[in-house]
């Protein structure tokens, strides 16, 4: 009996750990505040994290989740503090998404550009690192590490030895942390500042801050960079300059400096389910143009958006327009709570849109891995997108336009629009509105307001327009 009891306790403990590992919450930035959601819940729950008058930075997504699912990290700015050129950086904060505990890790001037980098969790989820420009006059940059168990912050690298960038002081470089160590990009400015011929390279550090290697790789500006899922310690990065017709993707072995000029782009995926993938444009730090391979289908969405993966790769959270969608088992459906947070109404037959900036909706879930893949071909029609001022019309002579739940040819049809019908089109990108142009199945889709809800209809396919402006 005692042995059976011990076996039962052991099996229960194993199952409990397994459940904890799979119950990684989706973290959502909704209008500057941190929410959490688990599959099966009716809507997100506010974490209770008090940001003391700050909100999550909108112009560039910094939201990250630890591998344990316990802590979220992000950059914050004072409310209404996004204004400025170049864009203000803000400060790095932590939030315990289960208890609501929240506190700042960096304490720089929030309006100063480049003063602190976003935080990166260690692979085991127990620590977080970031860099800070501690002395703007001397361009002194320090790398810090914070232990989540002890709540202690210490200096990992006293000085990264970065020079002035274009005579305007240095910046806190972004760091990436993988199984081979901690890597970051740096620049060395030549005698003629800002002439496009600075020297750029990468440094690799051990977890204890020991410098392992440093390589100059280019006299052309480096863009985005990520650790690759590889048997070698390789980083993929973008190289760009005015003399190049377009940015190129390369990768470097961080132990021997071997550069592979393999062209292509990055694909993010969850190793447990490689069919869930997002082919990324690496040409900027934020989202630009991506190919999202929908689970269970060969269909791809081409758009600029924010995507997050569940830990097992069977569910994808995708922000399209001003709404959150989930892709699973060949379906793409809206989160049922979308209109609760950014309601849309009509007043005198005109759309009443709530204030909505790009970045008011952001997501973070399991951390994907990356591999290099060939650059995919576009999935958009050959004709140019139309410019709508909130109203479009269904083209004559082509029949009714189907209205779908999502911008996807297999998405549920929820209605139709007869020829000549006026359509309430969610406007195209402006300073205060998100980009909504999305292509899939060779169709360019438009987000519309239909019978009190957000929906989608085809704008064009091939050289044919189904809508008119």
Image (tube, grey):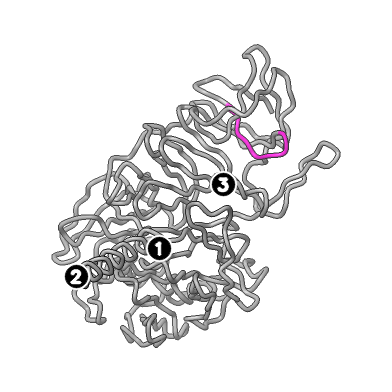
Q: Which residue is labeled 3 in the image?
A: 335
Q: Residue at x 47, y 49 (%)?
A: 317
Judging depth in this view, the residue of 113 and 318 nearest the camera is: 318
Image: 257 above or below 208: above
Q: Nearer the viewer, mark 3 or mark 2?
A: 2
Which tag, 3 or 2, sits closer to the chain's start?
2
The spot of residue 303 in percent (x, y) is 49, 41
Report crowding for label 1: few under 14, some 14 to 19, many 20 or more residues within 10 A (C-alpha): few
Q: Which residue is labeled 1 in the image?
A: 195
The image quadrant that residue 56 belongs to is bottom right
State the separation of the CA atoms marked 3 and 2.
47 Å
Q: Residue at x 31, y 83 (%)?
A: 157
Q: Which of marks 1 and 3 is in front?
A: 3
Q: What element carries label 2?
A: helix
The spot of residue 295 in percent (x, y) is 39, 39
Q: Specify whether residue 190 is in view.
A: no
| Image: magenta residue range | 451-459
């Amino acid at each position: 009996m005692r042995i059976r009891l011990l076996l039962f306790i052991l099996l229960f403990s194993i199952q409990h750990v397994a459940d904890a590992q799979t119950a990684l919450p989706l973290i959502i930035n909704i209008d500057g505040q941190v929410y959490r959601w688990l599959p099966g819940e009716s809507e997100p729950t506010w974490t209770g994290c008090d940001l003391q008058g700050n909100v999550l930075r909108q112009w560039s997504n910094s939201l990250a989740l630890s591998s344990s699912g316990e802590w979220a990290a992000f950059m914050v700015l004072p409310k209404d503090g996004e204004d400025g050129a170049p864009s203000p950086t803000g400060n790095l904060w932590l939030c315990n998404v289960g208890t609501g505990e929240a506190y700042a890790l960096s304490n720089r001037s929030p309006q100063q550009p480049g003063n602190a980098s976003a935080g990166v969790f260690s692979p085991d989820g127990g620590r977080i690192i970031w860099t800070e420009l501690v002395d703007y006059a001397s361009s002194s940059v320090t790398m810090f590490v914070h232990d989540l168990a002890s709540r202690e912050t210490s200096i990992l690298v006293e000085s990264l030895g970065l020079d002035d960038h274009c005579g305007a002081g240095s910046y806190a470089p972004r760091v990436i942390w993988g199984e081979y160590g901690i890597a970051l990009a740096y620049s060395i400015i030549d005698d003629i500042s800002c002439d496009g011929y600075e020297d750029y390279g990468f440094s690799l550090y051990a977890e204890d801050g020991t410098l392992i290697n440093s390589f100059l790789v280019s006299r052309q500006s480096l863009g985005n960079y990520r650790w690759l899922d590889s048997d070698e310690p390789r980083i993929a990065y973008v190289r760009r300059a005015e003399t190049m017709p377009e940015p190129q993707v390369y990768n470097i072995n961080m132990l021997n400096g071997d550069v592979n000029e393999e062209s292509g782009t990055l694909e993010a995926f969850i190793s447990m389910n490689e069919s869930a993938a997002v082919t990324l444009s690496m040409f900027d730090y934020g989202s630009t143009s991506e190919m999202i391979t929908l689970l269970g289908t060969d269909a791809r969405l081409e758009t600029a958006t924010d995507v997050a993966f569940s830990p097992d790769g069977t569910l994808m959270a995708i922000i399209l327009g001003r709404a959150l969608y989930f892709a699973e088992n060949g379906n793409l459906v809206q989160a049922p709570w979308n209109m609760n947070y950014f309601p849309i109404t009509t007043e005198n037959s005109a759309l009443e849109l709530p204030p909505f900036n790009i970045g008011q909706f952001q997501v973070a879930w399991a951390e994907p891995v990356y591999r290099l893949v060939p650059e995919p071909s576009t999935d958009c029609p050959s004709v140019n997108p139309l410019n709508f001022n909130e109203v479009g019309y269904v083209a004559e002579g082509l029949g009714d336009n189907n209205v779908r739940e999502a911008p996807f040819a297999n998405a549920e049809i929820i209605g139709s629009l007869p020829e000549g019908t006026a359509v309430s089109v969610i406007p195209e990108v402006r300073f205060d509105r998100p980009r909504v142009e999305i292509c899939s199945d060779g169709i360019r889709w438009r987000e519309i307001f239909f019978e009190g809800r957000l929906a989608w209809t085809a704008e064009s396919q091939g050289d044919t327009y189904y809508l008119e402006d």
